[in-house]
Image (cartoon, rainbow, N blue to C red):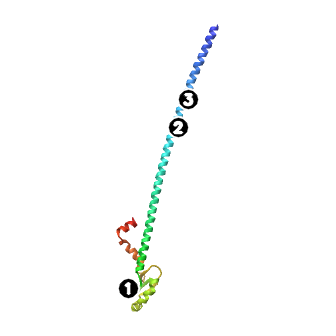
Amino acid sequence: MEQQIQDLVDSIRKEGLEKANQQRDEIIARAKEEAEKIVRQAKADADSMIENATKECSLRQQSAKASISQAARDVSITLKGELDALLNRILSDNIASAMDSALLSKLVLAVADSGLKDSEITVSTADSEAVVRSLKAELASKLTGGLELKPAHGAAGLRIISKDGSGYIDLSADEIASMLKPYLSESLRQIIFN
């Protein structure tokens, strides 16, 4: 009987060990499967994060390039505007200094001799007294025909205006500068306007 009990104990032990080994193998298999699943998910998450980071980096880089391009265009436009204004000032100042009272007197005489009537000639305030003095005797007879000489505030030069408002001729320094600007050398225009 003792042998039978021993065989029974051995049999139970053997069955217990086999069952424990089987459970152990199942637990290990499930753990491996779960570990592989976690690793796959981690790799997928990492790939997704890398892809998103790459896209965001690319978008930021494109945005930065666009901002730099816009800033360059803005600077270029501002610089062209400043250069254009500076050129206008230089031309206008040079023309204004060349338009002394003697030249203005000659221009007024030419207008008066042209037979233009019912018009008003405005001369810059700074030059008007000198022009009126030099023309007083010569224009006395012409001014009676409706031609009027008046001082004007503003740029140097003169302006001839029809009294009925039908037209005018602007010979101010600013207007002459704008008329001369297209005839500047091509290289100077390329520097300023391109």
Q: In the picture, residue 112 is in which quadrant? A: bottom left
Q: Position of residue 7 (x, y in %)?
A: 61, 11
Query: Label 3 is placed on what type of residue?
Result: Ala
State which tag comes first along the sequence, 3 or 2: 3
Q: Position of residue 91 (x, y in %)?
A: 41, 74
Q: Is residue 37 left or right of residue 171?
A: right
**Label 2: few (<14), some or many (≥20) within 10 Å?**
few
Q: Relative to residue 49, is residue 171 depicted above or below?
A: below
Q: Which residue is mark 1?
A: 106
Q: From the image, which quarter does the N terminus lie in? A: top right
Mark pair 3, 1: CA separation: 109 Å
Q: Residue at x 38, y 72 (%)?
A: 181
Does residue 168 appear in the picture of this structure? no
Q: Relative to residue 167, is residue 140 depicted above or below?
A: below
Q: Are marks 3 and 1 in contact (CB under 8 Å)?
A: no
Mark pair 3, 2: CA separation: 16 Å
Q: Residue at x 44, y 61 (%)?
A: 73
Q: Is residue 187 left or right of residue 6?
A: left
**Label 1: few (<14), some or many (≥20) within 10 Å?**
some
Q: Which residue is mark 3?
A: 31
Q: Are marks 3 and 2 in contact (CB under 8 Å)?
A: no
Q: Which residue is mark 2?
A: 42
Query: Label 2 is placed on what type of residue?
Result: Ala
Q: Position of residue 28 (x, y in %)?
A: 55, 26
